[in-house]
Image (cartoon, helix red, strand yellow):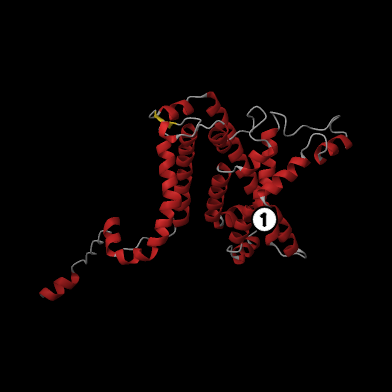
Amino acid sequence: MTMAAAQEDAPRTRAAPRPRPGLMRRIIRHRADYLYILPAFAVMLLVIGYPIYDTVYLSFFNTPPSLAMADKTYVGLDNYSRILTSDSFREVTVNTLIWTVFSTFFAFVLGLGAALSLNTYFAGRGLLRGLFLIPYVISAVAASYVWRWLYHSDFGVFGALSVAFGITDTPINFLDNVHTSLPSLIVVNVWKEFPFAMIMLLAGLQTVPDELHRAARVDGAGTWQRFWHITMPHLKGVTLVTVLLLLVTNLNGFTIPWIMTGGGPAGSSDIWITQIYQLAFGRIRFGLASAYSVILFVVMMGLGYFYVRALTQGERRPE
C-alpha cells in the first residue's frame, strides 16, 4: 500500500471549532459600528441609567421630610431590612402575587379562547375582532373611572342588577369591602389585558399548518387531541413570550389599583407599586421607597432575563 493510499484510508478528524471571541474583543473589533448608536446610548444613559443609579444610591439613605437632600443620613442596608422584615411587606407581597398570577392566568385563558374562536372563518369575524380590541385601546384611566361607577355601591349597574334579579337584598359593596376589592380589580385588569393575549396567540395560530389538522382528523383525532398535540406545541414560543409580558405588565401595573381603590380599604388591594408610591409621595420617605423600588427592579430584571431567553432560544450563535 502506497503512502498516498494509506493517507486516504486514514480517518479524517474534524477540525476543532475555533473559540468564540470574548465580548470585549468583539466590541473592539466592531468599535466603528458603535459610533452610530453612541447618541442613542448616551440618551439611554441619561434617562434610564442615571435614574436607576440615583434610586440605588438613595436606597442606602434616610431622606428628611423637608426634601433637603443635603441632610440625608446614611443607613446602609437598614431600609432593606426594615422592608423585608415588616408585616406590611408580607401582606403587600401576597396581594401582589394574587394580583399578578390571577390577572395573568385569566387574561391568557380568555385571550386563548378568543383567539381560537376568531381563528376560524365566519360572517362578522372582522367586526368581532375589532370589538374585542376595544378594552385594550381604551385609556386605563378612563376605564378605571368607568368601572368605578359600574362597581358603585349606590349607583352602580352591578349592584342594581344583583338586587333586581334577587341575588342580594342590598347592592354589593365591591370596592369598599376588604374581601372583594382585590378580586374586583383583577376582573377589570383581565378585561383590559385579554385582548393583548388574543392578538399574540391569534398571530401564533396563523403559523399552525392546516395539513397537520387535516391529517390528524383523518387519523381519527378528536378536537381536544388536535388542540393538545398540534396547536399547543406550535404556540409554545408565543405562549411563553405572552405570559412573560403579562407578568411584567401586571407586576408593574399602577393605574387601575391606584385610581379605583388607592390600595384600600385597609390595604386589602395594596400591591408593591402602589406601596412605593405611597411611601415616596404620601409619607415623603424617598429612601425607603427607593429600597422598595430596587427590590421590584431586581424581580423585573429576573423576568426580563427569561423574556430575552424566550426570544433568543431559537437563534444559533455565530461560529
Task: Locate residue 154: give its quadrant.
Answer: top right
Q: Position of residue 188 (x, y in %)?
A: 69, 43
Amino acid at pointer 1 = Val
User: Quick one: 149 or 6, which is closer to the camera?
Assistant: 149
**Residue 22 in sight:** no
Residue 266: % across, % down? 65, 27
For image coordinates 65% across by 61% down, the residue present is 217
User: In screen coordinates, is 33 left or right of 237?
Assistant: left
Q: Position of residue 51 (x, y in %)?
A: 44, 45
* Callout 1: SS: helix
261 relative position to 313: left or right:
right
**Which of these two is toward me, 275 or 102?**
275
Q: Can residue 181 be seen at all in this image of the molecule? A: yes
92 to 249, vertically: above or below:
above
Q: Is residue 12 left or right of residue 2?
A: right
Residue drawn at x 19%, y 70% as measured from the top left = 9
State how many labels appear.
1
Residue at 15% over, 74% down: 5
Q: Residues within 10 Å of mark 1 (few under 14, many from 20)?
A: few
Name the residue carrying label 1: 137
Give residue 270's quadrant in the image: top right
Counting from the top left corner in percent of width and height, residue 237 is at 52, 55
Residue drawn at (40%, 58%) of the image: 41
User: In the figure, 135 relative to 1: above or below?
Assistant: above
In the rendered image, which quarter contains the C terminus?
bottom left
Please tell me which residue lies in front, 70 or 235.
70
For the N terminus, the image quarter is bottom left
Residue 308 or residue 237, whichever sits in front = 308
